[in-house]
Amino acid sequence: MNLKTLALTIAVLTSGCLHKYMYAQTGMTWFDPTTTADKSNEGNEGIDCETLKDGYQSDLGLLVTEFVARPFFTYTHPQIRKYLNGQPLMECSAKVQRVNENHFVIIEFKINSTRAKTNYGNLEKDVKIKVNLMNNEHLYLKSIERDRGKVRKNLQRTTYVGTYAISSADIDLLKKHSIDKVTVLWEEGVEEYEIVNVDLIKNQLGCLN
């Protein structure tokens, strides 16, 4: 499905998001979308596995292990790439969270436009994303909540957070295999994203005790 590409082009060009800004995900050569470096992040398990929370959370009454979010991918629709002077339309980070015995992948989508909600709509609850693995297998992860997106006009950005449950069987697959692509069904359409940090989820799941 088409995500109203022409409307989004107009939104980007008129929202002021073409100002010069620093990548939110800088500091990693492999994350530069123009690099020819190997995309594999193997050997960086220690970096990927920095924890944000690890232990009993008294305010929640739950055992929580949550890793620091790391860069996952960038994306710009081909039809509007020429308008963005090499800057990405979308920058995404991801992390693994374990709550008691339940596991989740949390993906934050940062879209560099204040009008993205018109073109993407919501991330709906109970909608599945397709995860393609490097071994040519695939699996589906279901969202556990709706996100309508938050606009930050001062940053010319709209941010969505998708929280996706991981089953026990899928944990085993994700521990063994790197992620090649993720397909996300938005309210207004579907897009497929090529992953840059292909070992991120594998590394973080492998770091859980």
Image: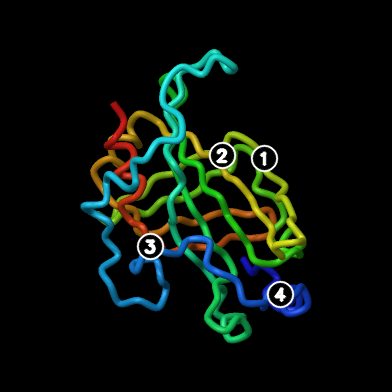
Query: Which residue is labeled 1 in the image?
Result: 146
Query: Which residue is labeled 3 in the image?
Result: 196
Vertical arrangement, residue 207 with respect to residue 202, above or below = above
In percent of the image, x 49 and y 62: which residue is there?
Answer: 192
In percent of the image, x 49 and y 56: which residue is there?
Answer: 183
Vertical arrangement, residue 188 with respect to residue 107, above or below = below
* Crowding at mark 2 (Cα within 10 Å: few <14, some 14-19, many 20+): many
Q: Report the front residue among 167 and 59.
A: 59
The quarter of the displayed image where residue 139 is located: top left
What separation in Å lies between label 2 and label 4 (alpha carbons)? 28 Å
* Crowding at mark 4 (Cα within 10 Å: few <14, some 14-19, many 20+): many
**Which disc, if any, is residue 143?**
2
- Where is residue 153 shown, x and y percent of the image? 77, 61
Label 2 sits on what residue type? Ser
In percent of the image, x 58 and y 53: which residue is there?
Answer: 185
In the image, which is nearer the foreground, mark 2 or mark 4? 4
Query: Which residue is labeled 4 in the image?
Result: 12
Q: Report the front residue among 198 and 58.
A: 58
What separation in Å lies between label 1 and label 4 (alpha carbons)? 25 Å
**Which disc, if any, is residue 67?**
none
Question: In the figure, is residue 39 to the left or right of 184?
Answer: left
- Where is residue 98 shown, x and y percent of the image? 43, 28
Q: Secondary structure at mark 4?
A: helix
What separation in Å lies between label 3 and label 1 (alpha carbons)? 26 Å
